[in-house]
Image: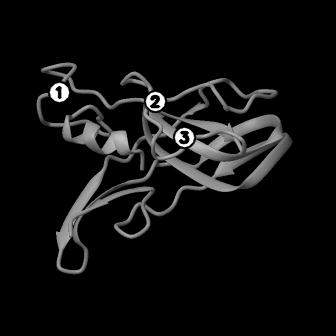
């Protein structure tokens, strides 16, 4: 999880789901922010210190658009507070991240999840084994949206 994201949450700068509270953008019709996912080269420096999306170090290739893809965000964050899990808030995108029919011949190993509605603020960075793709689809399968497996988890101790 990006360090800047944690404080931005406390400031109310990200809205992953429709809220019943007064929204920062509209008093009557709050909306969900648009999340995006971008892929980065093995040589890129994208990590927890990343604060915003950057094109520096991003992959390029056939059918890949700078800025990546829009993340399917149909599942709102959930929270629970039981003796077994303490307090946990969690979120997983509702579909795999799929880059369709791309050719990415330079090795990549990182995806940046970011909020394009809020000035491209970084949310989280996820690394995986080095990959290349030739005229195929690349999918990152999302984990279960549970207290122990969700892509993003915040817990109390």
Badge 1 or badge 2: first in the primary sequence: 1
Q: CA distance from mark 1 to mark 2?
A: 22 Å
**Residue 17 coordinates in the image, percent (x, y):** 30, 39
Give the quadrant of the C terminus. bottom left
Taking 12 as reference, is 106 left or right? right
* Front position among marks 1 and 2: 2
Taking 129 as reference, is 115 left or right? left
Name which residue lies at 67% across and 31% down. Answer: 58
Crowd band around label 3 with a 10 angstrom C-alpha radius: few (<14), some (14–19), many (20+): many
**Residue 12 coordinates in the image, percent (x, y):** 21, 34
* Front position among marks 1 and 3: 3
Badge 1 or badge 3: first in the primary sequence: 1
Residue 23, which numbered label? 1
Task: Say which residue label 3 marks.
Answer: 112
Residue 52, which numbered label? 2
Assign a secondary structure to mark 3: strand
Assign a secondary structure to mark 2: loop
Name which residue lies at 12% across and 35% down. Answer: 21
Number of residue marks: 3
Q: Are marks 2 and 3 in contact (CB under 8 Å)?
A: no
């Amino acid at each position: 999880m990006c360090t800047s994201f944690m404080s931005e949450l406390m400031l109310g700068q990200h809205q992953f789901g429709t809220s019943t509270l007064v929204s920062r953008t509209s008093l009557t019709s709050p909306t969900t922010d648009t999340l995006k996912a971008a892929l980065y080269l093995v040589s890129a420096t994208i990590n927890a210190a990343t604060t915003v999306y950057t094109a520096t170090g991003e992959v390029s290739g056939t059918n890949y658009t700078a800025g990546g893809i829009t993340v399917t965000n149909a599942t709102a964050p959930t929270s629970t507070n039981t003796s077994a899990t303490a307090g946990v808030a969690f979120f997983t995108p509702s579909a795999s991240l799929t880059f369709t029919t791309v050719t990415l011949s330079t090795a990549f190993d990182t995806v940046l999840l970011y909020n394009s509605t809020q000035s491209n603020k970084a949310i989280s960075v996820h690394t995986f084994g080095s990959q290349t793709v030739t005229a195929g689809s690349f999918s990152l399968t999302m984990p279960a949206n549970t207290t122990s497996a969700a892509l993003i988890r915040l817990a109390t101790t």
